[in-house]
């Protein structure tokens, strides 16, 4: 019984303390704080690159953004894979695995805060690839600021990502690499 009384007493003290804190928070509104510096709204960046994969370049192309990205930014790269029957672009998010008659190869990428690299890896001699896989390849690099990242979004849907970023096709600049 003694243990029960102690528990009841502790509950009473906690209820009283909570009521005191909740009801004791009244009074005049404090002074307005100092005005802070205006923040910047970052919408993200999108640009196209065109390059060739060859043995001399170790089957890779790379470049610099021309600006710094933040640690929290998300970098996505899409490859122009084909065109539909109406002539519209078909973009595929990389890494992209390709099943070729010679074996399997992958378009892949990595990035840092100031540059990116797109490269081919495969389980066969990449010199045997047709030029349609290696020459004049077009990629889109999208840099999404952390405040624009939606974890539920399907990032493989290139058009939806551009729409979410508020980017028009006509505003995308192209860079030629190698």
Image (tube, grey):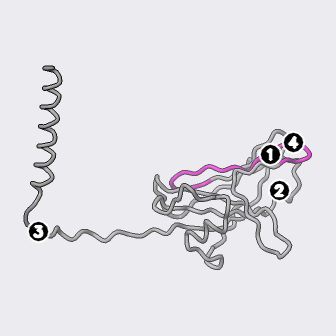
| Residue, far front | 1
Residue holding disc 2: 133
Is the C-beta separation of discs 4 and 1 under 8 Å? yes
Q: Sequence order check: which comes first, mark 4 or mark 2? A: 4
Q: Sequence order check: which comes first, mark 3 or mark 2? A: 3
Q: Quadrant for the N terminus, please.
A: top left
**Residue under the point 63% across and 58% down:** 154
Classify mark 2: helix, strand or loop: helix
**Residue under the point 12% across and 55% down:** 23
Would residue 103 be found to the left or right of residue 106 on screen?
Answer: right
Residue holding disc 1: 105
CA–CA distance between discs 4 and 2? 14 Å
**Residue under the point 92% across and 46% down:** 101
Residue holding disc 4: 103
Q: Nearer the viewer, mark 3 or mark 2?
A: 3
Classify mark 4: helix, strand or loop: strand
Of residue 71 and residue 152, the one placed in the foreground of this image is 152
């Amino acid at each position: 019984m003694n243990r029960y009384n102690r528990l009841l007493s502790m509950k009473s003290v906690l209820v009283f303390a909570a009521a005191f804190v909740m009801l004791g928070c009244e009074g005049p509104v404090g002074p307005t704080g100092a005005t802070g510096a205006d923040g910047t709204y970052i919408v993200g960046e999108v640009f196209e690159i065109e390059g060739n994969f060859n043995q001399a370049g170790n089957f890779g192309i790379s470049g610099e953004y021309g600006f710094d990205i933040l640690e929290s930014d998300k970098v996505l790269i899409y490859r122009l894979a084909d065109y539909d029957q109406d002539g519209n672009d078909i973009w595929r998010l990389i890494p992209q695995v390709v099943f070729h008659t010679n074996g399997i190869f992958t378009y892949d990428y990595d990035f840092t805060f100031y540059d990116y690299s797109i490269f081919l890896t495969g389980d066969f001699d990449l010199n045997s690839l047709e030029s349609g896989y290696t020459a004049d390849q077009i990629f889109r690099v999208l840099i999404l600021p952390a405040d624009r990242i939606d974890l539920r979004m399907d990032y493989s849907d290139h058009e939806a990502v551009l729409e979410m970023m508020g980017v028009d096709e006509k505003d995308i600049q192209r860079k030629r690499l190698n």
